[in-house]
Amino acid sequence: MPTLESARQKRASVLQQIAEESYGYPNDEFPDREITTNFPSEQMGVRVRSGGWLYPDIVVTDEPGHFIAMAADLALTHEVTNDTAIERWKPLAQTAPLILYVPMGQSGRAIRLCRMNGIKLHKLMTYRQRPAGFGIDLQQAYSGPDLLKPIAGLLPPALRPMAYRNERKVVADAYLQPLPAARSGDIPAIAAPAEQPAATLALPSGLDDEHGHGEHDSPESHLPPPSLAPILFALGLIVMAAGAIFVGEMLSVGITLIVLGAARWFLEDMGYFEAGGPAEFRQRPLQVMPDVAPPPPGIHMPPPSLSPLIFAAGLIITAAGAVFTDQVLGAGITLIVFGGVGWFLEDIQAFEEPAHDDHHDEHEADAPLMHGEGGAEQSAS
């Protein structure tokens, strides 16, 4: 790693060459633009929503008013790290269009760091100083589309690469609404502390939270919510093994149970992870939620469900099994049973919700067709 003095000299030399090569403002195309270099002394600060200040290496503003047109930041070889990406590149990229300069040979690492931390750059440039001070070579690094992102979104959370997991995403809401840059000699060099997160309520000893968990000795380990999917999966394995020896229909029943259990397990795991998962639970064990008003009285549609589709698929497969092969018949009957039972349980749960309570006295006042102006019931003519 270079010494502090050599790193400062390197940064000053590269910044001077980049400014002369790429930022010749004002010019004929942009006569109102100015360029300010924040090295070795800080001259132009970019104010962020939290009230603090950031100092990109180069700030391009539209005058008058110091409105930010773009910002540029230089990273030496030893500065292309994950800490630099989180603490400097990410907030800078959220305050202004950021052009990042990295040494040639470091563009691949910079692209990975930006994707890992959700940093959107205006441009990624690579630089190389020519020998004996004969200028600098600049080249735009093309990162290409992120082809793995949509594929990673389809994988279970445990199988996703670390760059696409929610734990690696840093929340930085304080930098989403930048203010105009300001020119002053007494601007603080360190940004003000960000706003504190929302208040949380710690769990008393012996009580369970909404996920069914009580006290945790380790903040890193949390069990997922209860689920029937592992039981269905294990039952499917047992029935499939028995079907391979005894009755052919049991083989298809076991395979169907395995598929249903694995699909349900996968969907529950995806939903739990996307809703926050262990990382969100560590930060906010029990979020204080405001009171939610109940839905208005009347007719309410049940929530969406896959049970009718499973039931219908079971009927179709059963009809096909009665004609072709008994293995298909067993799979169809299994789907009918699980679809019908699931539909029945969901209907009971929806009926027992407060929105479906039989409060006739409360609903009568909301039926103007059945009452007169004085509140008395209209007699049938």
Image (tube, helix red, strand yellow):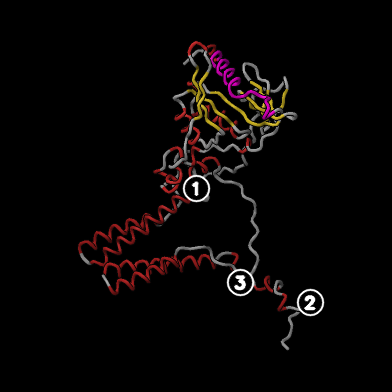
Q: Amino acid at mark 3?
A: Asp
| Disc 3 and disc 2 in contact, CB within 8 angstroms | no
Q: Is residue 288 magenta?
A: no
Secondary-structure class at tag 1? helix
- Is residue 217 visible in the rendered image? The answer is no
Mark 1 nearby-residue class (10 Å; few <14, some 14–19, many ≥20): few
Real-space Cα separation, disc 1 to disc 2, in angstroms: 51 Å
Per the rendered image, the range of residues in magenta is 8-30
Q: Position of residue 131 (x, y in %)?
A: 48, 13
| Mark 3 neighbour density, 10 Å: few (under 14) some (14–19) many (20 or more) | few
Disc 2: CA contacts within 10 A as few (<14), some (14-19) or many (>=20) = few
- In percent of the image, x 66 and y 22: which residue is there? 36
Answer with mark 1 or mark 2, whichever residue precedes in sequence.
Answer: 1
Can you see residue 324? yes
Q: What residue sits 67% from the left and 25% below the top?
A: 27
Q: Nearer the viewer, mark 1 or mark 2?
A: 1
Which structural element holds mark 2? loop
- Location of mark 2 (residue): 373
Amino acid on which the number 1 mark rests in the picture? Glu
Read off the residue under disc 1.
Answer: 274
Mark 1 vs mark 3, foreground winner is: 1
Q: Report whether 266 appears left or right of 284.
A: left
**Residue under pointer 3:** 358
Q: Is residue 341 left or right of residue 73?
A: left
Q: What is the quadrant of residue 5 in the picture?
A: top right
